[in-house]
């Protein structure tokens, strides 16, 4: 199967931003990952990441971006969106559909607010318009665990909050191995990304999003809470909402029809 998978990077000032791409369609579809990008970037992983998105390949070229490599301590989510827009310009992506997952959905909101001319359609998955009490407690706990060197506990807590109990059964046997691997990671990027979430708030700017927007959530989301998707739906005029019953923050991984549902939204004329 020809996936046309490629690894690349763009230069932003004195640093680089890694991305992967796959597919051969004429339209561009950009994916922005969540806080996990603060631990493991997409660099060199095009073939590994491509498979779930193969339903897009005939109509779209899919790009998945990491945050830039060097980030200042006060790097905000709005700054991340500005840098994402610069990366798109460098690659000649004058207009694209964008899907952001979790923290990536926060970046995507600012892209649609501040760089509206570049966004065709917007998908906000398992995200929120500000750091509500659920997010603040969750992310603050992760920061504390990482600061305390409790890397296995960090991984366990992240997974427990994201996945359903049935889904977790597949991975719990790998916890000792994954816990060991997490000790070897550098957490500087993680801290900067996590702290940016705590300062994030687009609530008063959501009405500026004019492009067709698809908001996706799970009824059991323990990371962003259950009200966040409704707050976005209320304020983004041209939007539709879909909730996965019984799924949580990892609905984008657990739901077998997730990418097909997003594809249908992108292909619907509005």
Image (spheres, grey):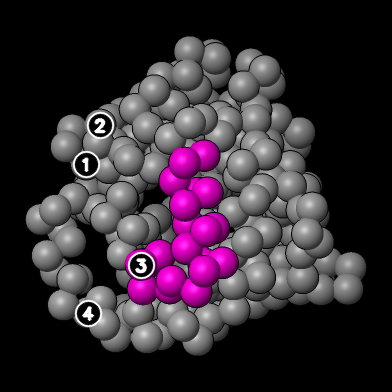
Local secondary structure at mark 2: loop
Residue 3 on the magenta segment: no
Residue at the image position 75 percent from the left and 37 percent from the top: 115
Q: Earlier in the sequence, mark 2 or mark 1?
A: 2
- CA gap between label 3 and label 2 equals 25 Å
Q: Is residue 41 something one can see in this rendering?
A: yes
User: As rendered, which of 68 and 147 lies closer to the eye?
Assistant: 147
Find residue 14 and report its horizontal and vertical position in percent: 88, 73
Disc 4 target residue: 174
Which callout, 1 or 4, points at the residue further toward the start of the chain? 4
Q: Quadrant of residue 247?
A: top left
Residue drawn 31% across and 51% down?
A: 162
Q: Residue shown at 29%/85% (left/top)?
A: 177
Mark number displayed over residue 153? 3
* Quadrant the N terminus occupies: bottom left
**Residue under the image location 64 percent in, 51 percent down:** 195
* Residue denoted by label 2: 219
Label 1: few (<14), some (14–19) or many (≥20) C-alpha neighbours in 10 Å: many
Residue farthest to the front, as pictured: 148
Q: Position of residue 103 (x, y in %)?
A: 54, 47
Front one among 19 and 134: 134
**Residue that carries the numbered disc 1 in the rendered image:** 247
Image: magenta residue range: 136-155
- Crowding at label 3, few (<14), some or many (≥20) Cα neighbours within 10 Å? some
In the image: residue 130, left or right of residue 124: right
Q: Answer with mark 3 or mark 1, whichever residue precedes in sequence.
A: 3
The mark closer to the camera, 3 or 2, is 3
Q: CA distance from mark 4 to mark 2?
A: 27 Å
């Amino acid at each position: 199967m020809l996936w046309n998978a490629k690894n690349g990077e763009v230069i932003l000032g004195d640093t680089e931003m890694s991305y992967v791409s796959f597919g051969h369609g004429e339209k561009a579809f950009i994916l922005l990952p969540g806080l996990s990008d603060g631990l493991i970037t997409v660099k060199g992983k095009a073939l590994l990441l491509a498979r779930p998105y193969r339903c897009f390949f005939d109509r779209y070229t899919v790009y998945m971006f990491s945050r830039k490599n060097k980030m200042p301590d006060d790097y905000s989510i709005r700054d991340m969106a500005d840098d994402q827009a610069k990366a798109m310009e460098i690659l000649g992506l004058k207009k694209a559909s964008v899907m952001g997952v979790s923290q990536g959905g926060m970046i995507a909101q600012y892209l649609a607010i501040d760089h509206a001319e570049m966004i065709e359609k917007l998908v906000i998955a398992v995200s929120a318009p500000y750091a509500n009490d659920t997010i603040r407690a969750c992310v603050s706990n992760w920061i504390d665990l990482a600061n305390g060197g409790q890397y296995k506990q960090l991984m366990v807590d992240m997974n427990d909050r994201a996945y359903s109990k049935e889904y977790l059964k597949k991975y719990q046997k790998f916890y000792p191995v994954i816990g060991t691997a997490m000790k070897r990671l550098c957490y500087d990027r993680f801290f900067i990304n996590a702290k940016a979430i705590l300062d994030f708030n687009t609530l008063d700017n959501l009405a500026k999003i004019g492009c067709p927007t698809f908001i996706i959530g799970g009824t059991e989301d323990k990371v962003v809470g259950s009200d966040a998707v409704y707050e976005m739906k209320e304020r983004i005029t041209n939007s539709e909402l879909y909730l996965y019953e019984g799924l949580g923050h990892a609905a984008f991984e657990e739901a077998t029809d997730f990418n097909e549902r997003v594809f249908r939204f992108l292909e619907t004329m509005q």
